[in-house]
Image: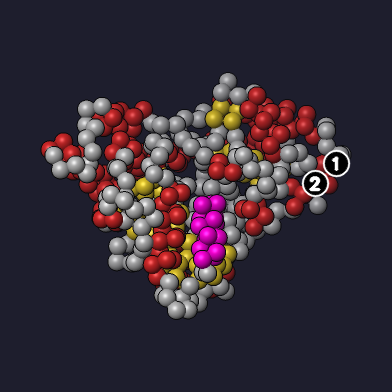
C-alpha cells in the first residue's frame, strides 16, 4: 500500500483543476500581455481569476498579484514593504520565531541592509500572543509578519489581534496564509490584513503559482522588474494555466470545505488515538486546540525522526520531519526549538499531514508500520527506559 501523508508539503493536483487548466495549455495559449485578440481574451480570463480569488478572500481584485510561489510572494512583500517605507528611525521589522524559512531569511537579508529585526517568541504550544508582540513593537516598526497557520505544527494564530497591535503603532501587518486554506475562513477586511501570501499547490492546485495580496494604498517596491506586468508590481509573463488552476482550486476548497474538514479531522483523530494506544513514549508538539485538523506533529522518544521517515518510506508510507523546504537540511527544526522542546528530542519528530485523498484504511496501515518501525529502531538506542524520555 502507498500512503501519502505529506499534504502540508504539497497536495495532489485535483483532476477537475487539471481539466480547468488544459485549455490554457493547448488552445487558449496566447500571452495575456499581447494586444491582439487572443491576447486580450487571455487577459480577460486573468481578470476573472483575480475577481474569483478576491471574492473568496473578501479583498479587492486589483490587489491580487499572481507570483510563481508563496516564497516569492513573501520575499516580495517583506522586502518590498521594508525598503519602500524605511525613513529616519523607522527601520524595524518584526517576524515570529516560528515563521517559514523564506520569511525568516527575508528578514535576515534586510538585517544585513541595516534594518533592525526582532523575532516574537512563541509559547510552548506554538502560539504568538499579542502581549509578546507588544513587548517588541514601537513606532520605529514598519512591518509585522506572523503566519496564519504554522507549517510544521499546525498551530493557528489570532492574526486579527496581532494586526490590531501592529496598527496601533502605525505598522503594517502581513500573514503567510499558505497553510490556512481551507481550514480558516480568510477575510482580509475583517482580519484587518494589509498583505497576505498563498500558494496553489497546498490546496490541490498546481505548483509554480502563488498569490501576493497587497494593499495598493501602502508603499511597496517590486522584487522582480522587467516587462511591467501587474502595473510594475511584478514583471514576468503571466502563468495563465497556473493562475486559472489556482483560482479554481481555491474556489473548490471553500465550496467543499465543510465535508473536507469533517473528513480530515476524523482521520487525524483516529491516527492520534491509535498512536497513543500503540506506541509508548510519544508527545504531541503544539496545541491540539488551536490547530488545523489535518496536522499531527509527534515526538517519538529516543529515535531519530529521519530514521523513522526512511523506514516508513520503504514500507510505502510517506511523511515528513518538518518543512518541505528543509528536507535536505538535517538541522533541528527552529519551530520546535522556539516552543521549547527538549534539545535531546529535537530530531525525533514526524509530521503527519492528511488530505482529501486519504482513507481510514491507510491510517490503519500507517499505524501498523509505525509501531513496527519505532519498536525496531528503539532497539538500537542507548536509552533503555522509555520512562526516561519525557523527563
| Figure check: 328 above or below 65 | above
Which residue is depicted at the point 71% across and 34% down? 307
Q: Which secondary structure class fits the magenta region best?
A: helix
Which mark is drawn over residue 146?
none
The part of the chain drawn in magenta is 99-113
Q: Earlier in the sequence, mark 1 or mark 2?
A: 1
Which mark is drawn over residue 383?
1
Q: Which of 17/154 is in front?
A: 17
Q: Badge 1, how many Cα within 10 Å: few under 14, some, many 20+?
A: some
Does residue 177 show up magenta in the picture? no
Which residue is depicted at the point 39% across and 55% down? 223
Does residue 107 show up magenta in the picture? yes
Q: Which of 272/16 is in front?
A: 16
- Give how far across and how far down residue 197 sits, in percent: 41, 52
Q: CA distance from mark 1 to mark 2?
A: 8 Å
Q: Is residue 273 visible?
A: yes
Residue furthest out toward the top? 1
Q: Badge 2, how many Cα within 10 Å: few under 14, some, many 20+?
A: some
Q: Quadrant of residue 281?
A: top right
| Figure check: 388 above or below 21 | below
Which residue is depicted at the point 54% across and 65% down? 111
Q: Which residue is mark 2?
A: 389
- Give how far across and how far down residue 102 sits, in percent: 51, 52
- Give how far across and how far down residue 300 sits, in percent: 72, 41
Amino acid at each position: 500500500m502507498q500512503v501519502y501523508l505529506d499534504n502540508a508539503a504539497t497536495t495532489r493536483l485535483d483532476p477537475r483543476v487539471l481539466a480547468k487548466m488544459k485549455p490554457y495549455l493547448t488552445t487558449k495559449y496566447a500571452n495575456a500581455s499581447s494586444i491582439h485578440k487572443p491576447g486580450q481574451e487571455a487577459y480577460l480570463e486573468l481578470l476573472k481569476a483575480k475577481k474569483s480569488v478576491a471574492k473568496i478572500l473578501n479583498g479587492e481584485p486589483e490587489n491580487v498579484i499572481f507570483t510563481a510561489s508563496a516564497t516569492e510572494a513573501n520575499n516580495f512583500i517583506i522586502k518590498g514593504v521594508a525598503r519602500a517605507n524605511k525613513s529616519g528611525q523607522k527601520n524595524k521589522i518584526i517576524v515570529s520565531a516560528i515563521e517559514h524559512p523564506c520569511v525568516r531569511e527575508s528578514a535576515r537579508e534586510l538585517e544585513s541592509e541595516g534594518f533592525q529585526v526582532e523575532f516574537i517568541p512563541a509559547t510552548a504550544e506554538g502560539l504568538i500572543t499579542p502581549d509578546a508582540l507588544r513587548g517588541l513593537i514601537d513606532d520605529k516598526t514598519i512591518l509585522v509578519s506572523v503566519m496564519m497557520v504554522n507549517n510544521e505544527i499546525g498551530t493557528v494564530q489570532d492574526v486579527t489581534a496581532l494586526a490590531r497591535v501592529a496598527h496601533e503603532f502605525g505598522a503594517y501587518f502581513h500573514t503567510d496564509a499558505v497553510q490556512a486554506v481551507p481550514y480558516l475562513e480568510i477575510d482580509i477586511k475583517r482580519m484587518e490584513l494589509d498583505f497576505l501570501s498563498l500558494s496553489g499547490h497546498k490546496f490541490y492546485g498546481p505548483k509554480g503559482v502563488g498569490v501576493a495580496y497587497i494593499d495598493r494604498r501602502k508603499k511597496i517596491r517590486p522584487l522582480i522588474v522587467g516587462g511591467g506586468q501587474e502595473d510594475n508590481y511584478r514583471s514576468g509573463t503571466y502563468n495563465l494555466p497556473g493562475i486559472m488552476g489556482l483560482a479554481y482550486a481555491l474556489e473548490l476548497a471553500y465550496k467543499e470545505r465543510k465535508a473536507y474538514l469533517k473528513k480530515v479531522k476524523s482521520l487525524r483523530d483516529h491516527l492520534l488515538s491509535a498512536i497513543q494506544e500503540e506506541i509508548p513514549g510519544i508527545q504531541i508538539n503544539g496545541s491540539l486546540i488551536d490547530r488545523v485538523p489535518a496536522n499531527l506533529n509527534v515526538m517519538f522518544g529516543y529515535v531519530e525522526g529521519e530514521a523513522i521517515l526512511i523506514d516508513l518510506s520503504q514500507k510505502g508510507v510517506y511523511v515528513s520531519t518538518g518543512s518541505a523546504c528543509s528536507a535536505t537540511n538535517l538541522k533541528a527544526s527552529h519551530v520546535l526549538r522556539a516552543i521549547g522542546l527538549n534539545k535531546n528530542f529535537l530530531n525525533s519528530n514526524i509530521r503527519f499531514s492528511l488530505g482529501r485523498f486519504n482513507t481510514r484504511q491507510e491510517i490503519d496501515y500507517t499505524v501498523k508500520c509505525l509501531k513496527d518501525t519505532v519498536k525496531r529502531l528503539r532497539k538500537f538506542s542507548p536509552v533503555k527506559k522509555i520512562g526516561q524520555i519525557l523527563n
